[in-house]
Image (cartoon, helix red, strand yellow):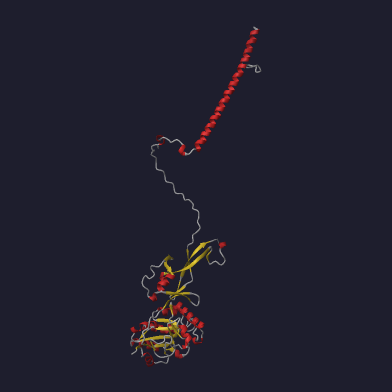
Amino acid sequence: MKLYYIIVSSCTAVKENRFSGLFLPEKHDKLIKKRETRTSRMRISRLLVCLCLLALLCACAAPAAALPETPAEATAAPEPVPTEPPVPAEPVEVPVAAEEPEPEAAVLPAEPVWVLGRLTDVYSTRESEWIRVEDVPEDAPMQTLNEVFTGEETLWAAVADILESAAPLQPEPGILDDLESISFGGQDYVKLEDAAARLGLEWGLAPDGSRYLAKRQTVGEIPEGWNVPVLMYHAVGDEIWGYSDLFVSAASMEEQLQYLQENGYEAIWFSDLAHIEDYEKPVILTFDDGYDDNYTVLYPLLEKYQTKATIFVIGNAMGSTHKMTQEQVYEMAASGLVSIQSHTYTHGNLSAMDEAALRQEMERSNAALAAATGQIPYVLCYPDGKYSYLTMDVAKDYYTFALRMDGWTYQTGMDPYQVPRSFVSRRITLPDFLWFIDPSGKTN
C-alpha cells in the first residue's frame, strides 16, 4: 500500500511538473516547438509589416497615370440631395501692399503775369517725385515738406481771366475752346503758352522782373500824299504847377474837340495811317509826359466827344508826382480811345547817348509800357525833341515812327523817324488852332 502511494504521488508530481529539476524529454520538445512557432509568427508579422510599408511608399511615389483607373460606376457622382442655398459670405478685403506714389502734375500758385495789362493769377505744373525729407538737397526748390519738382514748368491761367484781359482785342468767340485745359477750383484753365500763341501775344520781362504778355502793333504800307496835322499837347487843366504854356485850359481843350467833331475832322492813331484813305480830314492829337490831368481832365473830354488821342508816357515815371498811375494808364489804353506810346524810360537826352544807353532806354520803356497796357509801343517821342542820327538808327529796331517837337504839317511819305508836330500851348486861340489843322486831307 505504501509502495502504491509513493508511485502515484511521484507520477502526479511529474505530471504537474513539480520537480523542475527533473529531466522530462516530452515536455522539453513541446516547449521548443512552441518557441519556434512563436518566433516564426513574429518573423512573418514583421515581414508583412515591412511589405505593407514598402507598398505604401511605392503608392505615394507612383505618378497618377500609373494608378489604376476607377470604374465609371464607382466614380459616378451621387444624386444631389436638395438642400437650402448657402448664404453668400461677405467679401473679405485683402490688404494690398502700399505702392510708392507715381509722379504726377502738381498744381501750385506761381508768380502773377501781366496779361494784356492785367495782373493775372497763374498756376504752374511740374513733374514731381516724392523722396524722404532727410534726402532732400538743401538747394532743392521745395514747395511742400517732402516733394521735389523736376522738369519744365507749365503755366496755366483761367480762361475767364484771359478772355477778360483780351476784351480790348475783340477776339473771336470760342477762340480758346479747343485748347488743352484742366479744371480745379470751379474754373477751367488753359496753358498760358497756348493762349498767347492763339491771341498773337509776346512774352517779355518788365523792368521790375515781372513777366508779361503783350500784343505787338504792326502798321501796313502807308499811302503817300496825305496831309495829317500832328498836334502836340502836354498838360490839360487850370491847376498850373509848372511852365504855364504846357497847360492848355480845360475850356480850350473842349472847344477844340468840339470844333473837330462839328467840322468833319477825325482824330486818328498812327496805326490808322495804313488806311488813311478812309479819312477825309484826319488829325493826330498827341500828349507828352503822361501827366495825371490827362486822366482826370482830358480823358472825360475824350469820352464825351469820342475822340482818339495818343499819350507818350515816361516808363519809370508812372505813379510819381503829377504823373498817371499804372492803373490809370491801363484804363485809358483799354478804353479804345487812347494809344499809349513811348517817351523813353527816363526822359533823358537821346542825342548825348551811345548805342548801349539808347537801347536800354528804348527796351526798358517798351517793357514797362507793354506790361502796363498789354500793347508793345511802336511810336517814340524824342524827349525835348533832342535826337541824333544814331538815335534814329537805333529807333528803327524798336519803332515804326519817331516824333519831333517842332515843324509843320506831316505828310505821308516823309521820313517816319522825323515826324513834325505843331505845339498847342495855353496861349493858342481857336483861330490859331484852325490854322494848324486846315491843311488836313489829300494833297492836290
Q: Is residue 150 above or below residue 400?
A: above
For this rendering, which residue is in front, 65 or 11?
Answer: 65
Residue at 50% from the left image edge and 63% from the top image edge: 128
Answer whether residue 118 is visible to the viewer in this image.
Answer: no
Residue 346: x and y in percent read 50, 83
State the image coordinates of residue 53 (x, y, percent, origin top left).
53, 33
Indicate left or right for 33 with 111 as reference: right
Could you tell me residue 157's position as x and y percent? Answer: 44, 69
Whether residue 63 is visible to the viewer of this picture, yes or no, is: yes
Residue at 49% over, 81% down:
359
104 above or below 22? below
Q: Is residue 196 above or below residue 438?
A: above
Q: Position of residue 307 (x, y in %)?
A: 37, 83
Residue 13: image quadrant is top right
How many tags in the picture? Answer: 0
In which quadrant will I find the N terminus?
top right
Residue 244 drawn above or below residue 332: below
**Which one is nearer the viewer's eye here, 236 or 359?**
359
Residue furthest top in the image: 1
Quadrant containing the C terminus is: bottom left
